[in-house]
Amino acid sequence: MRETDLNHIRTQIDRLDEQLLNLLVERLALARKAQACKQLAGLPPHSPERESEILQQLLRLARSSGIDGELIEAIYQPILTAGRSAGQNERSTP
C-alpha cells in the first residue's frame, strides 16, 4: 500500500468521525427535547423499556451487518446515558 492510499483512507476516516460527531450532537439535542416533552406530559424521565427497544433494534441491525453485538452495546450504553444526562442537566439549569 502506498502512503498516498493510506492518507486517502485516513482522510475518509476523519470525515466519517466528523459526521459521527455531528450525528451525536443532533441525537443529544433530540434527547433533550424528548426529556422536555416527558416533563410536560408528567412522564418519568427515564424509560428503561425504550432503551431496551433501542438496543435490541441496534443489535438486530448489527447482526445483519456482521458487527459484533458487544461492540454495539459498548458504544451505545454511554450514548444512552449521555442522552439521559443531557435531559437532566437541562432541567437543573435555572
Image (spheres, helix red, strand yellow):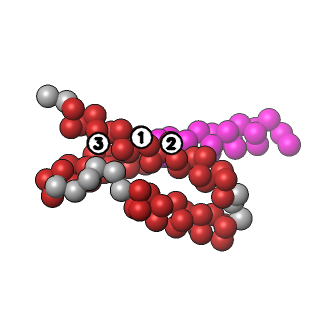
Name the side, left or right, on which 88 lies relative to 62: left
Start and end of the magenta stretch? 1-21
Name the side, left or right, on which 3 lies relative to 14: right
Q: Is residue 45 magenta?
A: no
Q: Is residue 16 magenta?
A: yes
- Mark 1 to mark 2 CA distance (whole Å): 6 Å
Give yes or no for contact between labels 1 and 2 (Cβ–Cβ under 8 Å): yes
Quarter assignment of residue 67: bottom right
**Amino acid of disc 3:** Gly
Query: Which residue is pictured at 48% across the width and 61% down the height?
Result: 52
Q: Which numbered dot is residue 82?
A: 1
Which percent across, then down, holds residue 48? 41, 56
Picture mark count? 3
Label 1: element kind: helix
Residue situated in front as seen by the camera: 4 or 68 = 68
Query: Which residue is pictured at 76% across the width and 39% down the height?
Result: 6
**Amino acid of disc 2:** Pro
Label 2: element kind: helix
- Mark 3 to mark 2 CA distance (whole Å): 14 Å
Which percent across, then down, holds residue 81? 44, 43
Query: Which residue is pictured at 36% across the width and 38% down the height?
Result: 85
Q: Is residue 54 visible?
A: no
Q: Which numbered dot is residue 32?
A: none
Which percent across, then down, holds residue 21? 47, 41
Query: Badge 2 is on which residue?
Result: 78
Label 3: element kind: helix
Going from the N terminus, do you reach mark 3 or mark 2 first?
2
Give yes or no for contact between labels 3 and 2 (Cβ–Cβ under 8 Å): no
Tell me the quadrant of the picture where the C terminus can be found.
top left
Query: Badge 3 is on which residue?
Result: 87
Going from the N terminus, do you reach mark 3 or mark 1 first?
1
**Amino acid of disc 1:** Ala
